[in-house]
Image: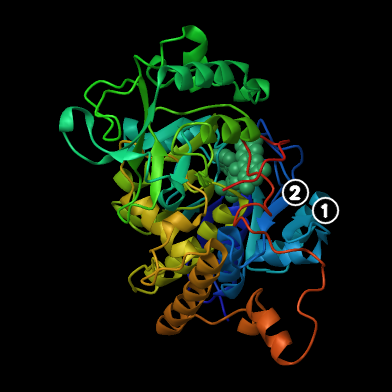
């Protein structure tokens, strides 16, 4: 395709989202100025000047299509993800997860960008939102000067510099015989409550105090706000601090006993379909294995499925639901589109997926067409819905998980079968949506995990070649998704 008559698009940030966006635009024939500051200015976490450097783990999590991360990858492969192509070229054995040799991967990303003469890579720090069509993908470590410029455009509440995340649990995994619906003083029944007696509370506090905490690098050491302290810090301040804080039982009656519990863990709805429940006031830096142990000891949460882990870390991100349009642009400049972790998605692959969409929508806008998002039965569409509809007041970054996606119309008890069905539906709907919008498939459908095995089985070939057992837990094939905890071996939601 020729670049004649197409405007130059500026992409700020040569990380995972920025590389995807730049290549996505070049493929559509746009001349691109990809501006990356490393080379003239470092970030606190990157070690090299390479485009697409992975700052932490070398894993992109599961490829299993019944796993939320696996489904995300299938959709991104159809859209021609540069990250996944580079990962395929540089992968190392990791069971059903996709892990890479990080040095080779960074080089493969740089080569993917260099393959397009339309892309000019410029090394400088951008300090103001540029004029003209622009994609801003400067990530969780956006430089101070640009952060200030974004903050001026969005207002004080528009940009956060730290996140303090409480775990999110799947409703299906809560024990309905113990957890009860009620608001304090019967104000509203919008909360779920896990009641504790005195002994259970005492044990819980001791476990919290003994729990191992992720201690980040110096620059990650977050100044805690008094109104938003980690639960383990509150527990260390006094035995009853939590019972008089987020775990206060006042105004609540346990229907099983007819009495007020000694303490209560409350869960607040995170999505309209009521699949994702946020543990109120439970922001934490406990290591994931410890989080699992401590939280599953809470009455009613013994089988809890973690859709997102608690964490607290340095992270620059925008209040997407409040300040950006559905396709992630400034309200008054639809051709200034944000992408990557900065938009409130969390994770390498999620960030790259957001970069792919930024390019797709920039092209549509520049051709005078309306921007689009994917259906909410798909993983990319579920994430996009979260970004536009989440509560602005409680907005915190989100990774892919099945709680983001519309529930099935049928009831399937077996969790693994249910996820597999959701994955198949997601893929079908994604393909329909691509066809509706005349988006060309970048890989054949039967090359995708799930479809590939079905094709091979139909042709009488071996189904799996890596010998990896499919994981019974949709998250358990994953490496953890730091930044919270780079070295943990606990599974991720
Ligand atoms: C320390 C840390 C560890 C993480 N670990 C993981 C993990 O293990 N797994 C996971 O899934 N996610 C992890 N994340 C979260 C996230 O997925 C990654 O940060 C991911 O790289 C985000 O992609 P991105 O493209 O949005 O940003 P980045 O990949 O960070 O790319 C942004 C780019 O913009 C550049 N930039 C910044 N400001 C400017 C400016 N003013 N002008 C020009 N260029 C600029 C930066 O140098 C950088 O190259 C981690 C984040 C951090 C901070």
Q: Position of residue 248 (x, y in %)?
A: 32, 20
Query: Residue drawn 52% across and 77% down?
Result: 4
Secondary structure beneath dot 2 equals loop
Q: Do the residues labelled 2 and 1 touch (CB within 8 Å)?
A: yes
* Residue 323 visible to the viewer: yes
Q: Position of residue 77 (x, y in %)?
A: 62, 71
Considering only order in the chain, which callout, 1 or 2, is on the residue closer to the N terminus? 2
Q: Is residue 327 above or below residue 292?
A: below
Q: Ligand 1 within 8 A of label 2's CB?
A: no
Query: Residue drawn 51% across and 57% down?
Result: 354
Query: Residue drawn 78% across and 64% down?
Result: 468
Q: Residue 58 carries which label?
A: 2
Model colouring: rainbow
Rendering quarter of residue 262: top left
C-alpha gap between disc 2 and disc 1 = 7 Å
Outermost top residue: 238
Rendering quarter of residue 381: bottom left
* Residue 310 visible to the viewer: no
199 vs 368, left or right, is right
Q: Residue 101 carries which label?
A: 1
248 vs 312, left or right, is left
Q: Is residue 300 above or below residue 418?
A: above
Outermost bottom residue: 459
């Amino acid at each position: 395709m020729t670049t004649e008559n197409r405007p130059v698009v500026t992409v700020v940030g040569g990380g995972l989202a920025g590389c995807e966006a730049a290549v996505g635009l070049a493929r559509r024939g746009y001349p691109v100025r990809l501006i990356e500051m490393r080379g003239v200015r470092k970030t606190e976490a990157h070690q090299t000047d390479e485009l697409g450097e992975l700052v932490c783990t070398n894993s992109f999590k599961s490829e299993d299509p019944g796993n939320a991360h696996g489904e995300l990858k299938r959709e991104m492969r159809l859209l021609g993800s540069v990250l996944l192509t580079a990962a395929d070229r540089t992968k190392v054995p990791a069971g059903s997860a996709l892990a890479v040799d990080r040095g080779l991967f960074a080089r493969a990303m740089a080569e993917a960008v260099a393959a397009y003469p339309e892309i000019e890579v410029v090394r400088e720090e951008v300090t103001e939102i540029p004029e003209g069509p622009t994609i801003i993908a400067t990530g969780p470590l956006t430089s101070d000067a640009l952060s200030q410029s974004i903050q001026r455009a969005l207002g004080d509440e528009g940009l956060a510099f730290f996140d303090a995340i409480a775990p999110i649990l799947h409703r299906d995994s809560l024990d309905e015989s113990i957890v009860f619906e009620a608001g304090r003083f019967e104000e509203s029944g919008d909360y779920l409550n896990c009641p504790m007696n005195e002994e259970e509370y005492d044990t819980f506090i001791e476990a919290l105090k003994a729990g191992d905490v992720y201690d980040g690098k110096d620059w990650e050491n977050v100044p805690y706000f008094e109104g938003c302290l980690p639960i383990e810090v509150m527990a260390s301040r006094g035995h009853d601090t939590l019972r008089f804080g987020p775990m206060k039982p006042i105004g609540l009656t346990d229907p099983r006993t007819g009495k007020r519990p000694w303490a209560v863990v409350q869960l607040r709805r995170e999505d309209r379909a009521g699949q994702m429940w946020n543990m109120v006031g439970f922001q934490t830096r406990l290591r994931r294995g410890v989080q699992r142990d401590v939280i599953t000891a809470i009455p009613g949460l013994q089988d809890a499925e973690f859709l997102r882990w608690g964490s607290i870390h340095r992270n620059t991100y925008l209040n997407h639901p409040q300040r950006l349009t559905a396709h992630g642009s400034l309200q008054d400049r639809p051709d200034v589109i944000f992408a990557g972790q900065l938009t409130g998605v969390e994770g390498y692959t999620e960030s790259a997926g957001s970069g792919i969409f930024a390019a797709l929508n920039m092209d549509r806008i520049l051709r005078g067409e309306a921007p689009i998002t994917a259906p909410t039965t798909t993983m990319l569409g579920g994430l996009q819905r979260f970004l536009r509809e989440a509560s602005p007041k409680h907005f915190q970054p989100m990774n892919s998980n099945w709680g983001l996606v519309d529930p099935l119309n049928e009831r399937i008890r077996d969790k693994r079968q249910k996820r597999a069905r959701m994955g198949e539906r997601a893929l079908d709907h994604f393909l329909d949506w691509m066809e509706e919008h005349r988006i060309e498939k970048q890989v054949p459908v039967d090359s995708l995990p799930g479809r590939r095995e079905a094709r091979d089985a139909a042709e009488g070939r071996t189904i799996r070649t890596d010998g990896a057992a499919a994981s019974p837990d949709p998250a358990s094939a994953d490496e953890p998704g730091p930044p919270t905890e780079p070295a943990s071996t606990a599974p991720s939601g």
